Each structure stands twice: as structure tokens, then as C-alpha cells.
Image (cartoon, rainbow, N blue to C red):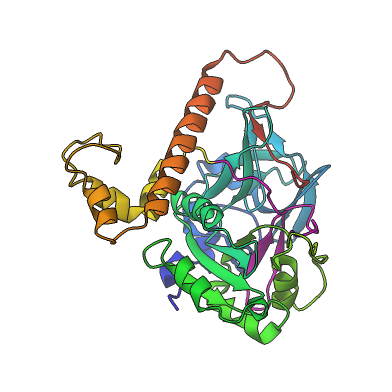
């Protein structure tokens, strides 16, 4: 098991909140505050503001917590002299101690987002400042290599450590093929097999859940995310329901994004199951997940080789030699084309003249319900 780097965690002591009047430095460190955020305190005026973290996304606003502070604030920050910004779960905000009005959204260590489903041409924010992404799938019909590659690309683009978590191993005679297939999806990828219903089995994930660190769970509904969360937090806070027998599809249980405190001192984010994960602005992430294709492409005769009928294609040669799966190449092609199309569409949408309106911006959306 590859443990998280120690220097990537939260800081403690006065340095963690130097320049703020946010209260107990240890309390902020417990929430995941780090020197990365401290360095963003711009001047003496901002030093008087209180840092708070977004703990949950509700229909009526964002539930935020800080040192001796817990309140609900609007999800959109209309700040004079800057563009309207939107916060999501895991974000850090600076709020006025008198009015509790959010004044600034701090830059993020990481941000998960996706191309929102439907025809709105928008980006949907999922979570911010996540350290590890647990990609949960079960050993039944839900196990889908193409879907796992999508999650991995999103994680690597955000520079977040992904871990594949296989559940419901009792449904198959041999779990080894599932482990082997998952481990091959990306160099150095960690794969854990556990029983989501067993707290002792779930404890295998605790090395990634140490003090102040934040982990997120993603995956289709019905794979055991909520059950696993309940095992880790030791209570029935996350609702659970069964799967449909005819197709192994889960029934939606989680309806909002929320951070749960773990006994290990870390934070756990649950998200609604997502039926669709369209990619946008994850070109580098795709390159890191499909590193073998990216590396081989450097040896192709043509720099713009599409790995089809071109002569001296190193990628096709590797497939012919049995060193690479042809289906892997086809999945890569599909994801690259999808990412390029969505990224171009989003760029064009952002270049259109903005409407004069005081309403919240239409291009970015945070859904609290499952799509």
C-alpha cells in the first residue's frame, strides 16, 4: 500500500493561520487548513476575515464550518471588482466576522468537475481540495473499465491520488481477474478489495484518511459507497438501499455532497451517484492514465499519428506484438475525441458576450440532486 506523503497534510500551530483572526489554529488544521491557504491572505483587511470550509451543499446554500463557526452562506459570491465565483463542497472561503458574508473564495489545491449532463453546455463542480479519490465499483455488472478510466483521468488532471476500491467480492468465485484488470488501467494504481459492510475491512482505507486529509468517494449507485461510509464513520448517517436484481443497478441514496468527520481525524466526502461523466479540460489527465500510448506515440514516424493506417506506427506495432490491447486504444481514442469536443464547446461558450444580469452565472452549475 502506497501511503500519502506526510508533507502534503495540514499544518498545525500558529503558522497554519498566521495573519488571520479565525480562532483556534488547531481547529482550522483539523478541518484541513494548510500553509497553501495561509499564503493567500492578501493584506491586513483580509487578515480580519474568518476562514471557513464548505462542509455540505444544500438547496438553500452552503453549510460552512470554521474555528467556532458554523453557518449557512450563499453558493455564489458576487464580489466587487471580481467575477462572480461559485463555491463547492471542500472549498475554503473568507467570511466577514460581523455579517458572515463570504468575501473571497480561496484558490484550490484540487478541483473535481465534469461536463454537466443535458443541453446546457455547462461545467458541474463536484468537490474541491480533495487529497485522495476512492473510485468504488463492485464485482458484478457494474464493473466497467471505460468508466473507471474516466474517473482516473479526472483524478489525475486534478493531481489527486486515485485508489480503486472493489466491493461485493463475495458475488464472484474469483476476485483476482477484477484486481488484475483494474491495476493495469494506470501505472502505480492502488487497488483495494474489501467488504463495505465490515468496519474492520473498511479500515484498510484509513492510511489515506489521516488527520486533516480529505478523501472523496465516487462510483455508480448501488456499489456500496454509502455502506462503506457508514462503516468508516461508525454510524448510519448515509442512507443505503439495495440494487435492482434485473441489471445490478443501484437505487439512488445520496442526494447531496457532504463531508463526514472520521475517527482517524480525516474527512470523507460522499457524492450522489453519477449516471454520466462527460470529460472536459482533462487532456493531461488522459495522458497520465494512458501513459503507455503517450510514450509509444513519441516513436511513431509522424508526430500527428492517429495510430490507424499510418506507416511505422509504434502504437499499432505494440498491439500487433501483443504488448497492448487494441480495445484500450479504442477507448483512448473515444475519450480524447470527447474531451477535445467538450473543451472546445466550453471555450466557445465562455467567449460569448455575457448577459447583463444580476442572476447567478449560467455556465457553471452545482447540482445537489442526482442527475
- What residue is drawn where x is 58% and y is 52%? 20
Q: Quadrant of the C terminus?
A: top right
Count of residue discs: 0
Locate residue 104: give its quadrant. top right
- Magenta-drawn stretch contains 78: no
Image side of residue 61 versus residue 288, left or right? right
Residue 10 position within the rendered picture, expressed as x and y whole percent measured from the top left? 52, 65
Residue 109 appears anywhere in the view = no
Residue 109 position within the rendered picture, expressed as x and y whole percent measured from the top left? 49, 52
- What residue is drawn where x is 70% and y is 35%? 76
Which stretch is magenta?
A: 249-278
Label the magenta part by its dominant secondary structure: loop
Please tell me which residue lies in front, 327 or 273.
327
Residue 144 position within the rendered picture, expressed as x and y whole percent measured from the top left? 57, 58
- Magenta-drawn stretch contains 267: yes
Please tell me which residue lies in front, 136 or 18.
136
In this rendering, the answer to whether 216 lies above or below 261 is above
Locate residue 142: give its quadrant. bottom right
- What residue is drawn where x is 17% and y is 43%? 312
- What residue is drawn where x is 63% and y is 77%? 172
Locate residue 244: give its quadrant. bottom right
Please tell me which residue lies in front, 273 or 179.
179
Residue 230 position within the rendered picture, expressed as x and y whole percent measured from the top left? 75, 73
Q: Quadrant of the N terminus?
A: bottom left
Please tell me which residue lies in front, 264 or 67.
264
Image side of residue 35 versus residue 74, left or right? left
Residue 320 appears anywhere in the view = yes
Image side of residue 175 versus residue 302, left or right? right
* Residue at the farthest bottom position: 200
Amino acid at each position: 500500500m502506497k501511503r500519502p506523503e506526510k508533507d502534503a497534510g495540514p499544518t498545525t500551530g500558529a503558522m497554519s493561520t498566521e495573519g488571520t483572526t479565525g480562532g483556534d489554529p488547531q481547529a482550522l488544521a483539523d478541518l484541513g487548513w494548510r500553509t497553501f491557504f495561509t499564503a493567500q491572505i492578501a493584506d491586513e483587511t483580509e487578515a480580519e476575515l474568518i476562514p471557513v470550509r464548505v462542509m455540505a451543499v444544500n438547496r438553500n446554500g452552503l453549510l460552512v464550518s470554521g474555528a467556532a463557526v458554523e453557518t449557512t452562506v450563499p453558493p455564489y459570491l458576487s464580489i466587487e471588482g471580481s467575477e462572480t465565483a461559485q463555491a463547492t463542497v471542500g472549498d475554503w472561503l473568507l467570511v466577514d466576522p460581523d455579517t458572515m458574508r463570504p468575501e473571497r473564495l480561496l484558490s484550490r489545491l484540487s478541483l473535481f468537475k465534469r461536463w454537466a449532463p443535458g443541453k446546457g453546455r455547462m461545467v458541474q463542480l463536484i468537490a474541491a481540495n480533495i487529497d485522495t479519490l476512492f473510485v468504488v465499483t463492485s464485482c458484478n455488472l457494474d464493473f466497467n473499465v471505460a468508466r473507471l478510466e474516466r474517473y482516473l483521468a479526472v483524478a489525475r488532471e486534478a493531481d489527486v491520488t486515485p485508489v480503486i476500491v472493489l466491493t461485493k467480492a463475495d458475488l464472484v468465485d474469483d476476485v483476482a481477474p477484477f484486481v488484475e484488470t483494474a491495476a493495469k488501467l494506470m501505472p502505480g494504481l492502488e487497488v483495494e478489495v474489501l467488504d463495505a459492510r465490515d468496519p474492520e475491512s473498511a479500515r484498510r482505507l484509513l492510511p489515506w484518511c489521516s488527520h486533516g486529509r480529505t478523501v472523496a468517494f465516487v462510483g455508480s449507485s448501488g456499489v456500496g459507497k454509502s455502506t462503506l461510509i457508514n462503516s468508516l464513520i461508525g454510524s448510519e448517517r448515509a442512507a443505503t438501499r439495495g440494487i435492482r436484481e434485473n441489471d445490478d443497478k443501484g437505487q439512488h441514496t445520496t442526494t447531496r455532497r457532504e463531508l463526514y468527520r472520521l475517527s482517524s481525524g480525516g474527512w470523507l466526502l460522499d457524492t450522489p451517484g453519477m449516471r454520466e461523466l462527460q470529460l472536459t479540460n482533462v487532456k493531461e489527465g488522459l495522458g497520465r492514465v494512458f501513459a503507455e500510448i503517450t510514450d509509444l506515440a513519441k516513436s511513431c514516424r509522424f508526430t500527428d499519428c492517429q495510430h490507424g493506417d499510418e506507416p511505422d506506427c509504434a502504437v499499432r506495432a505494440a498491439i500487433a506484438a501483443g504488448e497492448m490491447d487494441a480495445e484500450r486504444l479504442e477507448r483512448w481514442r473515444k475519450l480524447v475525441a470527447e474531451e477535445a469536443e467538450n473543451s472546445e464547446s466550453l471555450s466557445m461558450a465562455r467567449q460569448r458576450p455575457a448577459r447583463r444580469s444580476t442572476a447567478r452565472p449560467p455556465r457553471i452549475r452545482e447540482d445537489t440532486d442526482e442527475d
